[in-house]
Image (cartoon, grey):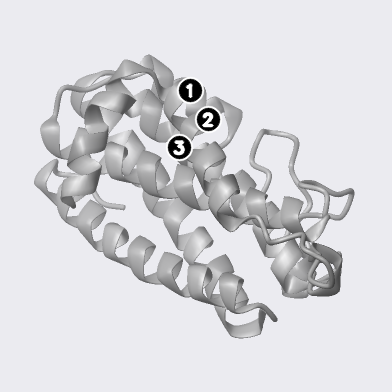
Amino acid sequence: MTPALRSARPMVLAGGTVLLLALGLIALMLVRPSTSAGSGPAATAPPDSSVDVGFARDMSVHHQQAVEMSFIVRDRTSDEAVRLLAYDIINTQANQRGMMLGWLEGWGRAKSSGAEPMAWMGHSFTPRGDGSLMPGMATDGELDELRAAKGKKAEVLFLKLMTVHHRAGAEMARAAAASADTELIRNLAAGMVKGQQSEIGLMADMLEKRGAKP
């Protein structure tokens, strides 16, 4: 847990929605390309069908659910270890999501499209209509179950759902790190793989301490 994340905890407690909006606005201001003469976004923007654009769109959706689940468990348990993990996911993935949405805007690309999720990876995924829009994402029923749970039950369910979520997210990030055209996406995706793999290991230990398995 970095000092920066620890200092952000009161902000999260004060209001998750405010934090998400603030992080997204800051990221958007930082990453928006210059529009000076001869250097506009259109000059260097990756194509709409590119890995870069597809990954930014899909991972933004994937991250949003991870943040949502983290806010839910934060209010369903008093366990400090689980709450700290939730804070880390909220801050990290909300910030990354803001960066990706900012890049899409700077490139002049829509933040969503009619294409099936993960088509940029060479294989598309057809949503099943249960709220799970991509591999690893929780269904509406699973989210309702998490909202209804308390204490250890909520902790175990969250850790299991987030482990599956991270595994699928890491797979998407590996594909982008290997195939994206822009250094922005390649570097961000590579960092996601490392971060989410580390948290998968942490969550396995946390589940074991609670007598459960991923």
Q: Residue 68 or 187: which is nearer the viewer?
A: 187
- Write the residue at 42% across / 29% down: 19
Residue under numbered circle 3: 67
Q: CA distance from mark 2 to mark 1?
A: 6 Å
Mark number, residue 17: 1
Secondary element at tag 1: helix
- Write the residue at 66% across / 34% down: 131
Q: Residues within 10 Å of mark 2 (few under 14, many from 20)?
A: some
Q: Earlier in the sequence, mark 1 or mark 3?
A: 1
Task: Indicate the amino acid at tag 1.
Answer: Thr
Q: CA distance from mark 1 to mark 3?
A: 11 Å
Mark 1 or 3: the one toward you: 1
Residue under numbered circle 2: 21
Apparent side of residue 111 relative to residue 150 in the rendered image (left or right): right
- Write the residue at 50% across / 42% down: 26
Secondary element at tag 2: helix
Q: Residues within 10 Å of mark 1 (few under 14, many from 20)?
A: few
Task: Indicate the amino acid at tag 3.
Answer: Val
Quarter of the view holding residue 210: top left
Image coords of residue 161 (percent x, y):
41, 43
